[in-house]
Image (spheres, rainbow, N blue to C red):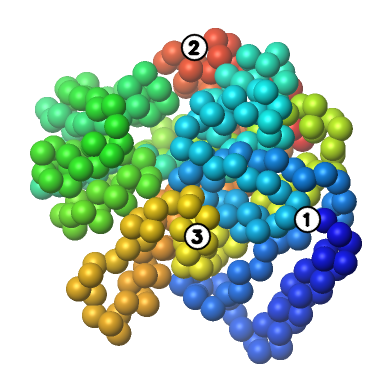
Amino acid sequence: MKLSKRLFAAALALMLVLALAACGINNTNNTTTTAPAVTPTAVDYKGDTIKVAAIKGPTGMGMVNMMDNDIYDFTLTSDPTEVATLLATGKVDIAACPLNLAANLYKKTNGGVQMLAINTLGVLYLLTNGETVNSLSDLNGKTIYATGQGATPEYILSDLLKANGVTAVQVEYLSEHSELAAKIATGDCKIAVLPEPFVTVATNKNSAVTVALSLTELWNDAHPESRLAQGCVVARKAFIDSNPDGVAAFLADARSSVEYVNTNPLAASAKMVEKTIVDEALFSIPADTAEKKQDSAKTEKANAVIGRCNIVLIEGAQMQQIADENYKVLFAADPTSVGGALPDGALYYGA
């Protein structure tokens, strides 16, 4: 990127900040719709274009305000396997992916990748349609439906059921999130565990579907030394070693983008749709919403959806502590889920 463009962008951002300060605007309310969508400018980066891959949905949502910055070339996909291939073959430099995939890549590449940050905490929720569930103990004697058998969602759910002494429960697994979202929306099942954005897909289809429990909150209660994490950002070790300025620029922009998404959810949701990270229907409001209430309804929906996605950027020692505790649970359930062995400290950049 040319220096003149960078100076212009920086000057524009500064003018906007000064203008807001002069007007005395307090932008601490998450429901504001007037915040400018300023694309963050990387800190003093003059290197080659940084190639980034991200998975559509929560794992990629936090980077939406970086996607107009011409120092990045983004590839979006719905398939974590494709992200792994792009990174392992050197076709991208940085990738946002599931947490357990980072451990697998680290093992398969013999330490050829490092984790830069955790970017998504837990996105799993227990939904009900016609049932009352106030705690996991209420599930005894019931059947719940879930997805992700043989993968992280199953191991998280099993760990929480065990930690809460819930033994008399039957879990039926479906292969597709979309199938389960439709099943609970129609009432074909009464209790389901789903990740975002399929939580919202189900609640959009039927207002009788409610979010009863957050598995993230339950995990944090069961594992107070940690936090449930499901998404992270990794980079090729060769890229990190050869381009430290690029890594610094990326992390600076990622921090800024995450802050933008969490403080301006309505504006951020529009950008997510524009960049095809999520489907437009995700943020839809009921068609019969009164015209005078549409703006507040749209804001409320954006706040709810983005809030449930738990978008963060956690780096350094805290990243390592959280990831390590998550990996221990996954390893105990199935060692192959983290590459057959717990990763060592060299996985973590800056820790």
Which residue position is annotated with label 1? 42
Identify the residue at horizontal 65%, vertical 87% (top origin): 24
CA gap, disc 1 and disc 2: 39 Å
Left or right: 94 with respect to 135?
A: right
Disc 3 vs disc 1: which is toward the camera? Answer: 3
Q: Where is residue 26 in the image (x, y as percent from the top left)?
A: 59, 80
Q: Tag 3, which secondary structure?
A: helix
Q: With respect to residue 115, does 162 lie above or below?
A: above
Which quadrant is home to the C terminus?
top right
Circle 1 Cα neighbour tier, 10 Å, few/some/many (<14 / 14–19 / ≥20): many
CA gap, disc 3 and disc 1: 22 Å
Which quadrant is home to the N terminus?
bottom right
Q: Residue 274 carries which label?
A: 3
Looking at numbered disc 1 in the image, what kind of residue is underneath it? Ala
Q: Which residue lies furthest to the bottom in this view?
A: 23
Tag count in the figure? 3
Which residue position is annotated with label 2? 335
Q: Tag 1, which secondary structure?
A: loop
